[in-house]
Amino acid sequence: MKKILFLCDASDIDMVEQSFARQNRYDLTIETSEKILQFGVRPYLEQTIERIRNNPEMYDGIVGTHDSSAVFAAIIAQETGHRFAPVNAVINTQNKYLFRRIQRDILPEFTPAYALALDYLRKPSRLSFPFFIKPVRANISFGTHIVEQTGELEYHMARESFDIARFNQYYLNALAIDPAYHNALNVATCNNFLCEELVSGTQVTMDGYVFEGEVTFFGITRAVYHPNTNSFFYHAFPHRFDPALQDKIETALKKLIPALGIDNSFFNVELRADEEKQRFGIIEINSRIAFQFAKTIKSVTGTDPLHMLCDVATGQRPDPIKTRTMTHGACFNFELHLFHDARILQTPTQSAFEEIRLKYPEVSIRNLIHGNAHLSDFKHNPESYRYAVVDVPGDSHEQIMEKYYQVVSMLGYRFSKAPEDGKVSCIMAESPPHRTYGGSREVASQPVPED
């Protein structure tokens, strides 16, 4: 068995262990980003690199699954001679200003107008209202807004710049381990806001990998939002564009991805496409797996992207071996949100998880919070608070939605909210509140994609 240093978030552990439970190809040592941050980023990296250099047979591969763990994995891999996304590629993709500069050089026709916030304020004619803003180095959807009038940009900058700098400190600490990773433009811009022209169309995520310079795509997941919000209701897999548009997108991406420096790594691309106009716009590219959709894709294709991730890391061309016999026509990756802050009174018990496993063994649940805290204590986007991710496979839209509402009611999340009058109310996170956000009405007429 090949030995893998597998870096991920603490909330990923159950899913990772389940994915590798019944296989004999990979032996994982799991380390969490939370533990690394608690230990100290630079001491952890220095000590781990030294151990691997002193014991070259310790690991055959090193991987990371999210922005934080991908930074750590890239540095460890590059310093110890293992395969993963090069550190420069991680910088070029995680710093969205650097990404746009490279994109403009390679694909100017698919690059929206953009400017750093301070550059826009010096010359507002660069963009017209409304436009989109986001941190140059984003953390989930924190700090993302649509700016519709004068003064809104300055308001968001004043309100959120401190937290952006705080979130990014571990990133700068990690890169400081070696002067070779010092990119002056990255350091100067990563705590800024980026202003961008709005990109229209259906939003999707395209997953793929680069192996020895060859770019391969293996799935498209479509995003569905809660109406009138920037919060995801669910992501539907699989999605397909018509062949002409699909070819146009892939041809463009095969030029851009190598230019970002991505090689021997997974990647995911967020973009919006308009099939009627045969147009698309790239939102961002990440030099890592879209971990959130690993179970989503596996539920339909029978192939586990986490195993493919380890293939690339150990120098093997991914082999789409089916790791489960039962697959489904589609899978929806739901995000559970509240649209206001609240104190967390109860998260699912182990018996609740076990009951769901017995009734719906095909469903996968990732809890993102813990009790004795507020939802605002966890990373969140400006208008909602995400507390769980649920993968629900099925063979029809109606079947998936019905199963989803049953699972949510069984989870038993409970929250309390203190209104302005000071009276505390208790909120049960059951299916009706989710229906009131309008997500099911928005998608009720959309069929499950055909295989």
Image: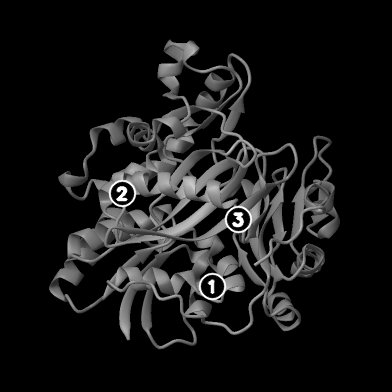
Mark in the foreground, 3 or 2: 3
Q: Label 2 amino acid?
A: Pro
Please give left or right for residue 314 compared with residue 405 in the image.
left
Q: Residues within 10 Å of mark 3 (few under 14, many from 20)?
A: some
Direction front: furthest residue: 244
* Closer to the camera in the image, 195 or 217: 217
Q: Which percent across, then down, holds residue 214?
A: 32, 59
Closer to the observer: label 3 or label 1? 3
Instruction: Residue 15: give its label.
Output: 1
Q: Identify residue for label 3.
A: 240
Does the residue at mark 3 contact the one at mark 2 (Cβ under 8 Å)? Answer: no
In the rendered view, tell whether residue 99 sits above or below residue 332: above
Look at discs 1 and 2 and give the one toward the viewer: 2
Of 29 and 206, nearer the camera is: 206
Secondary structure beneath dot 2 equals helix
The image's colouring method is: one colour
Task: State the CA–CA distance, disc 3 to disc 2.
Answer: 24 Å
Name the image quarter holding the N terminus: bottom left
The type of residue carrying mark 1 is Met
x 83%, y 49%: residue: 441
What residue is drawn where x is 68% and y is 80%?
361
- Residue of label 2: 258
Mark 3 falls on what kind of element? loop
Circle 3: residue type: Arg
Residue at the spot x=25%, y=62% of the render? 77
**Disc 1 element:** helix
Can residue 411 be seen here? The reply is yes
Which label's residue is closer to the chain start, 1 or 2? 1
Is residue 171 visible from the viewing direction of this image? no
Q: Write the residue at 48% across / 46% down.
A: 249
